[in-house]
């Protein structure tokens, strides 16, 4: 209940920015927001950008076996810090404060980039991403070093607040992890010299110890990822993006340390009319992932999953979307999940959004005693301070 | 053999011409037009935002990255107008020549006197404001003059061999602009700079009367409407209003970038009725439902007028853009159909 009240209070604060005009110094501005915002103002400078994004969700889930529950949760606070260290070197870090699942017994992971530190009530803080970007390389090259998301498809590379859904698609969750596949290592990306289409080739060499498919505690356990991004301008209003991804690394389930492989295709069509672009837009994303790995008894498994998700903006602050999911489980391709969801998003301003919807998942196997569930959700996301604009 | 030699010469000439051409990318079409007016055939210019597009909300499409990759000069309007998309384009371009702080990066706002400066950092409570100042400065022709000079200077630094050519083009542009603003007779007799200075000091009428010269150009057309109150959709007309002594009495957006709410529209309507306001300026990319509602209830004239070159027919270059605004607004304030 307290979380719900907090959501409403903070949500009304977001909406306040969209309501009647008041000077910025007006004492009637929501005090909490104003203080936080001013706090961020105080520590920012032209070079140092500090931002925070809060994510709350309230959901009601009903299982096919008749049981149901509801949850009101503060899902995550993402703190971002970015600064340009030299004309050709930039540092970015994203710290996540979130509730963690109970960890298995054993030693905590070593290394600053891999650890999480307990805060209170099950919440912990740790780096989601932290990397240096080298922008001054010749030949159309850019390099990154540190902890970063694996360049597989589109959804995996996004931070949760940038996703058009409250959670990753089933195929991403099953193949890459609940949040995303992240690893420490290096990345080299190259922009092809031709004029059309836009072609960017990315190569990563990462240690992904928490990934579903890939394992690795040692530096030698590297996962190699390749992604090719092609974007074609169809006309001034629309583009189509076609991406290919491939990854190979030590199989997480194979005791003999043989490699698992992953391949993927992502397609995105975007339309935003030039003149009425404030009020209308469409983005339709589809991603297919296929994996080859061994299960715990050493059998080779080939599994695939796909999602397709259109989102249509029908007014300046409103959009509707849907997503259809299908995913086999990478450890046993005979088991699969299907999902369907619809949602509506309201953005009072660029710093905040509300999203409400329903998501239905069915399985051909039992998970926690049920073969499916339906979830109604209400998500509130808002931020303060600077936040780097998202790539197209 | 002769044909082959001719062909080779032609190709060599073409190659020389292209090698001597500076590739310029501007963030808006207004800057593009100014670069073209000053740079002539020594520049090859493309713009990111189209004239009928809201420059605050541009998606950093990869094709813009490709434009920036080959650029010799990147010109931005500045004052954080492009803050949401310029960093992605410049960083993605991997082009060292045009990064912020280099000679290939020009912030056109550097020489102008910004209005609505709030200081500090952007704050959601205040709407989509620009703490360093209102970025829609190019609709004041004096600022267009300043920006053209900054562009010519920067082009001359990048291509010193063209400095004389650029200085000549700049002078010609300034003459055309001054004449469009004050009329050719006054410019010929008193010189453009003196007229601008006098106009800023509010003594233009006296000066022209002293020399028995007519008030021509845009200044002459807007002269009868000094002190007139207008309504605008977005806070984008403050520079134009200051130049021509108009008063922005109300804005349809309760805060910059925030769509009109019913309560705020009621407030605007009462201001329109109380002040008998006659013109409501709306850029072509805004929804006309709210302006039309205000017009229906109050009788104010909705004037769809572009703020950028290419945003409307008749606004093909920078000079035509200002002419288009002046013609439409003066006709509406007079009560004619523009």
Image (spheres, coloured by chain):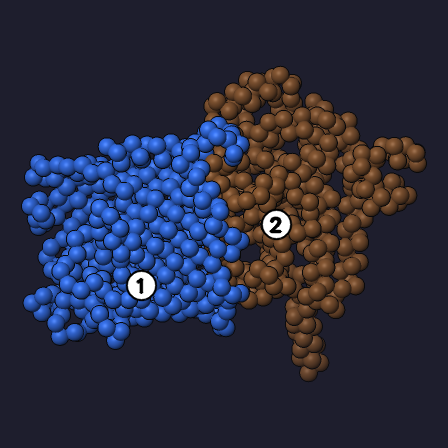
Q: Which mark is residue B77?
A: 2
User: Looking at the picture, does residue A266 appear above or below residue B79?
Assistant: below
Query: x%, y% of residue A65?
Result: 7, 39
Which chain is in blue here? Answer: A
Element at badge 1? loop
The residue located at (40%, 33%) in the rendering is A13
Residue A151 visible in the current orientation: no
**Residue identifier under label 1:** A113
Write down the chain letter for disc 1.
A
User: Looking at the picture, does residue B2 appear above or below residue B20?
Assistant: below
Query: x%, y% of residue B148?
Result: 71, 52
Viewer-proximal residue among A360 and B321: A360
* Callouts 2 and 1 on one subunit: no
Viewer-proximal residue among B59 and A32: A32
Q: Is residue A297 left or right of residue B323?
A: left
Viewer-proximal residue among B4 and A390: A390
How far apart, in angstroms, are the residues tagged by discs 2 and 1? Answer: 39 Å
Query: x%, y% of residue A130?
Result: 37, 61
Viewer-proximal residue among B174 and B275: B275
Q: Is residue A262 left or right of residue A349?
A: left
The residue located at (7%, 67%) in the rendering is A297
Q: Which mark is residue A308?
A: none
The residue located at (65%, 36%) in the rendering is B238
Q: Is residue B23 left or right of residue A234?
A: right
The residue located at (13%, 75%) in the rendering is A256
The colour of chain B is: brown
Element at badge 2? loop
Mark 2 or 1: in front is: 1
- The N terminus of chain A sits in image quarter: top left
């Amino acid at each position: 209940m307290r979380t719900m009240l907090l959501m409403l209070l903070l949500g009304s604060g977001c909406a306040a920015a969209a309501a009647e005009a008041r000077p910025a110094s007006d004492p009637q501005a929501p005090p909490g927001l104003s203080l936080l915002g001013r706090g961020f103002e105080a520590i920012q400078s032209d070079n140092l950008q500090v931002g925070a994004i809060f994510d709350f969700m309230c959901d009601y889930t009903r299982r096919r076996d008749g049981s149901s529950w509801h949850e009101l949760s503060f899902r995550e606070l993402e703190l971002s810090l970015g600064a340009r260290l030299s004309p050709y070197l930039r540092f970015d870090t994203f710290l996540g404060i979130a509730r963690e699942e109970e960890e298995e017994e054993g030693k905590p992971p070593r290394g600053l980039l891999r650890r999480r530190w307990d805060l209170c009530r099950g919440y912990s803080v740790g780096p989601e991403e932290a990397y240096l970007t080298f922008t001054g390389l010749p030949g159309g090259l850019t390099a990154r070093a540190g902890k970063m998301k694996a360049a597989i498809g589109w959804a995996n590379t996004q931070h949760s607040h940038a996703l058009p859904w409250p959670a990753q698609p089933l195929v991403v969750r099953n193949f890459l992890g609940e949040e995303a596949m992240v690893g420490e290592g290096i990345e080299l990306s190259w922009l092809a010299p031709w004029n059309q289409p836009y072609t960017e080739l990315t190569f990563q060499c990462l240690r992904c110890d928490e990934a579903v498919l890939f394992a690795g505690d040692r530096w030698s356990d590297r996962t190699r990822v390749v992604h090719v991004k092609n974007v074609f301008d169809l006309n001034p209003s629309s583009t189509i993006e076609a991406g290919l991804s491939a990854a190979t690394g030590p199989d997480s389930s194979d005791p003999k340390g043989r490699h698992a492989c992953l391949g993927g295709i992502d397609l995105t069509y975007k339309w935003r009319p030039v003149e009425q672009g404030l009020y209308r837009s469409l983005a339709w994303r589809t991603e297919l992932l296929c994996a080859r790995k061994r299960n715990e008894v050493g059998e080779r498994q080939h599994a695939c999953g796909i999602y397709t998700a259109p989102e249509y903006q029908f007014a300046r602050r409103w959009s509707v979307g849907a997503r259809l999911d299908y995913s086999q489980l990478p450890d046993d391709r005979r088991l699969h999940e299907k999902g369907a969801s619809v949602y509506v998003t309201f953005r009072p301003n660029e710093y905040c959004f509300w999203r409400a919807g329903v998501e239905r998942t069915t399985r051909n196997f039992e998970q926690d005693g049920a073969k499916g569930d339906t979830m109604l959700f209400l998500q509130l996301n808002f931020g303060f301070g600077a936040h780097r604009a998202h790539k197209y | 053999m002769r044909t082959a030699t001719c062909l080779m010469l032609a190709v060599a000439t073409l190659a020389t011409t292209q090698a001597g051409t500076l590739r310029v990318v501007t963030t808006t079409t207004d800057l593009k037009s100014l670069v073209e007016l000053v740079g002539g055939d020594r520049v090859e210019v493309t713009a990111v935002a189209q004239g009928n597009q809201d420059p605050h909300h541009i998606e950093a499409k990869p094709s813009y990255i490709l434009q920036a990759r080959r650029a010799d000069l990147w010109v931005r309007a500045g004052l954080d107008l492009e803050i949401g998309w310029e960093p992605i384009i410049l960083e993605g371009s991997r082009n060292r020549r045009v990064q912020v702080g280099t000679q290939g990066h020009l912030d056109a706002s550097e020489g102008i006197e910004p209005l609505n400066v709030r200081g500090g950092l952007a704050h959601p409570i205040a709407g989509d404001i620009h703490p360093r100042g209102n970025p829609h400065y190019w609709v004041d022709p004096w600022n267009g003059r300043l920006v053209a000079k900054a562009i010519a200077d920067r082009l001359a630094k990048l291509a010193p061999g063209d400095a004389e050519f650029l200085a000549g083009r700049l002078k010609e542009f300034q003459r055309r602009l001054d004449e469009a603003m004050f009329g050719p007779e006054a410019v010929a007799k008193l010189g453009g700079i003196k007229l601008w200075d006098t106009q800023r000091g509010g003594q233009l009428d006296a000066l022209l009367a002293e020399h028995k010269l007519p008030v021509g150009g845009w200044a002459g057309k807007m002269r009868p409407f000094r002190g007139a109150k207008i309504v605008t959709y977005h806070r984008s007309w403050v520079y134009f209003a200051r130049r021509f002594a108009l008063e922005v009495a109300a804005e349809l957006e309760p805060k910059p970038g925030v769509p009109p709410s019913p309560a705020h529209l009621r407030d605007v309507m009462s201001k329109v009725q109380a002040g008998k306001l006659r013109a409501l300026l709306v850029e072509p990319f805004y929804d006309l439902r709210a302006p039309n509602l205000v017009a229906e209830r109050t009788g104010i004239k909705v004037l769809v007028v572009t703020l950028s070159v290419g945003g409307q027919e008749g606004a093909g270059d920078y000079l035509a853009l200002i002419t288009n605004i002046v013609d439409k607004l003066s006709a509406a304030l007079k009560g004619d159909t523009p």
